[in-house]
């Protein structure tokens, strides 16, 4: 039996707008409703950003609290909060969700381990900032998902481990296809997998048209996949996704077609060593 595949739904993001896809969830209720449908369609985890009521990206702790509570009232899906936020945010702003404790604490948080061109912007992650966020994730008792837009960002995880800021083996997310950054090719994916610290787990998040084909590539290689409106608004060429759940359903179909079962949140918790 192969290892079950963890599907993560990146539901909101900071860049996608309602003008691009009117089905983007924004309010806590909309996010929770779509999250419950994603879980039914096969997602074990959601990667969460939040918005103000006007739709502006925000890392405000209270907005996260409301979304996390609404999701947990509806479904048992794991919640991974973003510490990336939107380009240009300060580190304190980005770490808003890391102030949530007790019943509102997320299950996991992202940690991008280097700087990358991000379209016409720069997603700024100097080493000092990465260490600051890593310490805050650790202080909250969480394990990070290490967001790697390039192979050097995997190597940086080894430095973080030597400094006692990240435990190895760890869980990585290869983000491929961002304009201005590393593009997905089979040999790129294979190199990233071969570059991982021993025993680590991985997810691949493809941007735009790369998103769904990369689910097949991940399934074949024993990995995991992230889909959702944060990274891609179409379910097929020119056809807008009706919600994140539709992208998850398509990812689930592809996973099963490649002989993979889907992980439940409980299985994902064990596979990703979330404790
Ligand atoms: N919005 C991007 C600039 C994360 O969530 O950790 C960063 C991002 C990464 O989405
Ligand atoms: Zn994100």
Image (cartoon, rainbow, N blue to C red):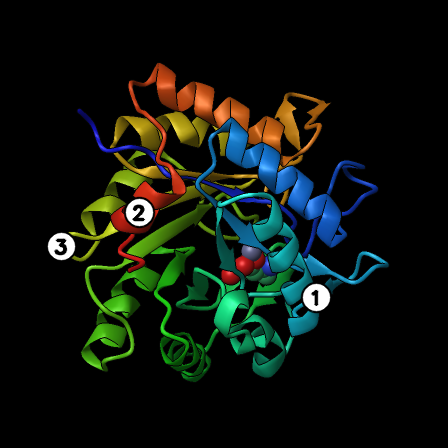
* Residue marked by disc 3: 198
- The quadrant of the rendering that contains the C terminus is bottom left
Which badge, 1 or 3, is on the more N-terminal residue?
Answer: 1
Where is residue 29 shown, x and y percent of the image?
74, 48
Mark 2 neighbour class, 10 Å CA radius: few under 14, some 14 to 19, many 20 or more: many
Quarter assignment of residue 223: top left
Residue located farthest toward the top when viewing the structure as drawn: 257
Where is residue 136 shown, x and y percent of the image?
43, 80
- Residue 41 in view of the camera: yes
* Residue marked by disc 2: 202
Q: Secondary structure at mark 2?
A: strand
Q: Secondary structure at mark 1?
A: helix
Residue visible at 79% across and 63% down? 52
**Image-based side of 237 in relation to 44, left or right:** right
**How much space separates mark 1 and mark 2, taking CA atoms?**
29 Å
- Residue 63, label in figure: 1
Mark 2 and mark 3 in contact? Answer it, CB < 8 Å. no
**How much space separates mark 1 and mark 3, taking CA atoms?**
37 Å
Quarter assignment of residue 160: bottom left
Q: Secondary structure at mark 3?
A: loop
Q: Nearer the viewer, mark 1 or mark 3?
A: 1
């Amino acid at each position: 039996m192969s290892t079950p595949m963890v599907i993560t739904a990146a539901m909101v993001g900071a860049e996608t707008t309602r003008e691009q896809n009117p089905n983007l969830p924004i309010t806590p209720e909309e996010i929770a409703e779509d999250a419950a449908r994603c879980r039914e369609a096969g997602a074990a985890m959601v990667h969460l950003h939040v918005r103000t009521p006007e739709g502006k990206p925000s890392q405000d702790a209270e907005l996260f609290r409301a979304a996390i509570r609404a999701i947990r009232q509806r479904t048992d899906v794991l919640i991974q909060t973003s510490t990336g936020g939107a380009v240009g945010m300060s580190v304190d702003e980005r770490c808003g969700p890391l102030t949530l404790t007790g019943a509102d604490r997320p299950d996991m948080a992202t940690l991008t381990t280097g700087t990358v061109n991000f379209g016409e912007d720069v997603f700024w992650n100097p080493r000092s900032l990465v260490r600051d966020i890593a310490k805050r994730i650790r202080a909250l008792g969480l394990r990070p998902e290490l967001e790697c837009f390039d192979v050097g960002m995997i190597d940086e995880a080894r430095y973080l481990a030597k400094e006692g800021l990240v435990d190895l083996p760890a869980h990585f997310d290869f983000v491929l296809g961002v304009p201005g950054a590393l593009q997905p090719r089979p040999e790129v994916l294979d190199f990233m997998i071969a570059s991982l610290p021993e025993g680590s787990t991985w997810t691949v998040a493809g941007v735009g048209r790369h998103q769904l084909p990369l689910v097949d590539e991940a399934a074949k290689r024993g990995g995991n996949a992230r889909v959702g409106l944060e990274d891609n608004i179409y379910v097929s060429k020119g056809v807008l996704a009706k919600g994140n759940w539709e992208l998850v359903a398509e990812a689930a179909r592809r996973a099963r077609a490649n002989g993979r079962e889907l992980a439940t949140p409980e299985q994902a918790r064990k596979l990703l060593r979330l404790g």
